[in-house]
Amino acid sequence: MRDTRISGPERVPIRDVIDHVAERSAGAPFLLSPETQRSVTFREFQRHVARWAQYLVSLGFTKGDKVACLLDNGLFSVELLFGAMYGGFVPVPLNVVAGPAQVAHTLGHSDARVVFVADEYQQLLTNSIQQIERPLQIIPADPDAGPEWRGSASKEVTLPHVHEDDDALLIYTSGSTSQAKGVVFTQRNLLAGVANTIAVYQFTPPRSVAVPPAALPSQCSHRDAPADVAKRWLCRHAAPV
């Protein structure tokens, strides 16, 4: 059997790949939102994810901290996922159709320090955190526009060093037959998947990768794992660096 694996981007952290592609394909469209008619170029995406990473640092979070989100599909939902990875944090997408017990278990088990939540899921979160005994910061956010800036959140800060073997994503099984179990992906894991996908499907610039709304990270539990979502988003122009 032919070995379709390739080396390259999986040997560096996701931050380096995003920065490199932003330099090479700065003005090319990266994210398209049919609902809002907004688009984001590779350069804009890089600036946005770096800004969200700096936002988390300015709020006092440190490398490896878990960043949970209870959001529908949207530009910010994607930027937060990658912004957390870019800054060395670990995003934890929550199942928006799960009940309070399941959300509470995920939040409790993951040790998430912060939750970004859309207005329509505030009550679900309120019912869930009654079972959480540790402090948990809650940040209201729009799936497209994100949260409102507060205080020094927009100030330039130094991001922590990120290594390809650092944890990059924490997802949970559906929990349909037992308590949901966490699965951790490293930055290397995700980018190795990207490399294999590029090789298998022979993606070459400027080929586009269409991702339906249901495949965005916030709606992952029953339709798509966010690790696969991350692979598809990174595949476009993600050549070895």
Image: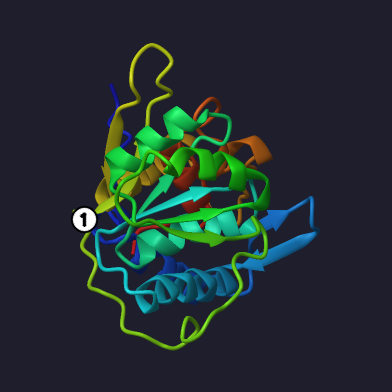
Coloration of the structure image: rainbow
Q: Could you say where residue 139 lies in the image, as x and y percent from the top left? A: 52, 62
Identified at 41% across, 77% down, the residue is: 54
Q: Could you say where residue 94 lies in the image, as x and y percent from the top left? A: 47, 40
User: The N terminus appears in which quarter of the rendering?
Assistant: top left
Identified at 24% across, 66% down, the residue is: 162
User: The C terminus appears in which quarter of the rendering?
Assistant: bottom left
Residue 7 visible? The answer is no
Task: State the residue in front, 129 or 171.
Answer: 129
Q: Residue furthest top?
A: 177
**Could you classify mark 1 by the number of other residues whose Cα lies within 10 Å: few (under 14), some (14-19), or many (20 or more)?**
many
Label 1, on which residue?
166
Q: Could you say where residue 81 lies in the image, as x and y percent from the top left? A: 46, 55
Task: State the residue in front, 181 or 21.
Answer: 181
Q: Could you say where residue 62 lies in the image, as x and y percent from the top left? A: 26, 68
Residue 125 visible? The answer is yes
Q: How many numbered marks does the figure carry?
A: 1
Helix, strand or loop at disc 1? loop
Image position of 122 with respect to 13: above or below? above
Left or right of 159 in this view: 83: right
Task: State the residue in front, 65 or 40.
Answer: 65
Identified at 44% across, 28% down, the residue is: 101
Identified at 47% across, 38% down, the residue is: 128
Left or right of 89 in this view: 149: right
Residue type at mark 1: give it.
Asp
Left or right of 110 in this view: 102: right
Image position of 118 with respect to 213: above or below? below
